[in-house]
């Protein structure tokens, strides 16, 4: 990976805001590649990598995506919008590929044999709701890697769940097995940053050892 860091990870985490408006300047291909690669490095259940991304940069497709996203202006203003999807059938197609890759990296045969039976056992029993929940977990991790890499590189980002599943499917001619999880707009902010909404105290959301007990640090 090329290193184009402009901020430390802690700085990026602290300074990141969901950007309300972008200036629309195009993003260099090598930067976009670095951001996307960060996403592809994310962990996933059984390393099945069920994520699929459509990267939208053309004026025409951004305009159509905006219409499928409750008319959110930032979709059209961003330099690129990553449409993050999960493929419910990905594991059926990619199990052999995952095992082949793993063997190259030193995956023990015993692990491969176990994965060959447990992946289908686990995933084929899912209802469509369970599959969507499983895909949401995997895909959001990859998208979060992309978001933080973009921020470290000095870009601004906006994650979005405000879109209509069927309409996004139609715009990008997505296969039926795809589930659209979220959008990530990337670019440079226009105007001032959004207010900081604040975060709950750690004592409100983090427990130690069991529910309700304060974590002692
Ligand atoms: C999964 C997800 C979906 C979101 N969807 C939208 C959206 O559709 N439109 C929007 O304006 N903001 C959206 N947001 C931004 C949140 O409102 C924002 O992250 C939150 O208010 C905290 O603000 P901050 O990110 O600037 O700290 C989304 C954030 C996340 C994580």
Image (spheres, grey):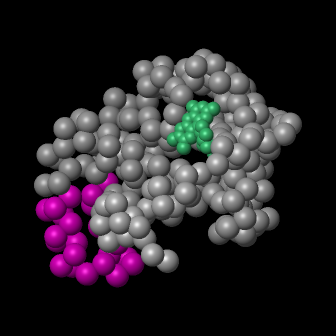
Q: Nearer the viewer, residue 196 or 212?
A: 212
Corner quadrant of residue 191: top right
Residue 160 position, x and y percent, is: 57, 36
- Residue 74 vs 63, above or below: the answer is below
The prevailing secondary structure element of the residues shown in magenta is: helix
Residue 77 position, x and y percent, is 75, 30
Q: In this view, does 47 lie above or below 64?
A: below
Residue at point 69% right, 35% down? Answer: 57
Q: Can residue 31 be seen in this view?
A: no
User: In the displayed image of the protein, which residue is found farthest to the right?
Assistant: 191
Between 207 and 34, the residue placed more toward the observer is 207
Whether residue 75 sits left or right of residue 175 in the image: it is: right
Quadrant of the rendered structure where residue 177 is? top left
In the image, the segment drawn in magenta is 94-119
Instruction: Decide if residue 159 is on the left or right side of residue 176.
Output: right
Q: Residue at x 44, y 62 (%)?
A: 206
One can see residue 92 in this view: yes
Residue drawn at 47 percent across, 55 percent down: 204
Who is closer to the viewer here, 88 or 164?
164
Residue 119 x, y percent position in the rendering:
20, 58
Residue 73, relative to residue 149: is it above or below?
Answer: above
Can you tell me which quadrant of the image ligand 1 is in? top right
Q: Which residue is drawn at 39% across and 78% down?
A: 105
Residue 95 appears left or right of 60: left
* Rendered location of residue 196, percent (x, y): 71, 45
Q: Does the magenta stretch include residue 95?
A: yes
Q: Does the magenta stretch include residue 80?
A: no
Q: For the N terminus, which image quadrant?
A: bottom right
């Amino acid at each position: 990976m090329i290193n184009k860091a402009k901020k430390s990870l802690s700085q990026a985490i602290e300074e990141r805001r969901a950007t309300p408006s972008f200036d629309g300047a195009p993003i260099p291909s090598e930067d976009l590649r670095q951001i996307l690669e960060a996403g592809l490095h994310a962990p996933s259940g059984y390393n099945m990598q069920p994520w699929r991304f459509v990267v939208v940069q053309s004026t025409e497709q951004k305009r159509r995506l905006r219409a499928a996203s409750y008319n959110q202006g930032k979709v059209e203003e961003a330099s690129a919008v990553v449409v993050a999807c999960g493929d419910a059938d990905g594991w059926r197609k990619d199990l052999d590929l995952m095992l082949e890759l793993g063997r190259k990296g030193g995956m023990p045969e015993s692990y491969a044999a176990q994965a060959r039976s447990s992946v289908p056992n686990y995933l084929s029993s899912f209802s469509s709701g369970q599959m969507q929940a499983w895909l949401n977990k995997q895909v959001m991790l990859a998208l979060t890697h992309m978001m933080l890499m973009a921020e470290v590189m000095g870009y601004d980002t906006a994650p979005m769940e405000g879109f209509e599943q069927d309409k996004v499917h139609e715009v990008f001619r997505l296969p039926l097995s795809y589930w659209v999880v979220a959008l990530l707009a990337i670019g440079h902010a226009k105007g001032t940053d959004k207010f900081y909404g604040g975060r709950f105290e750690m004592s409100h959301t983090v427990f130690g050892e069991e529910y309700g007990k304060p974590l002692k640090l």
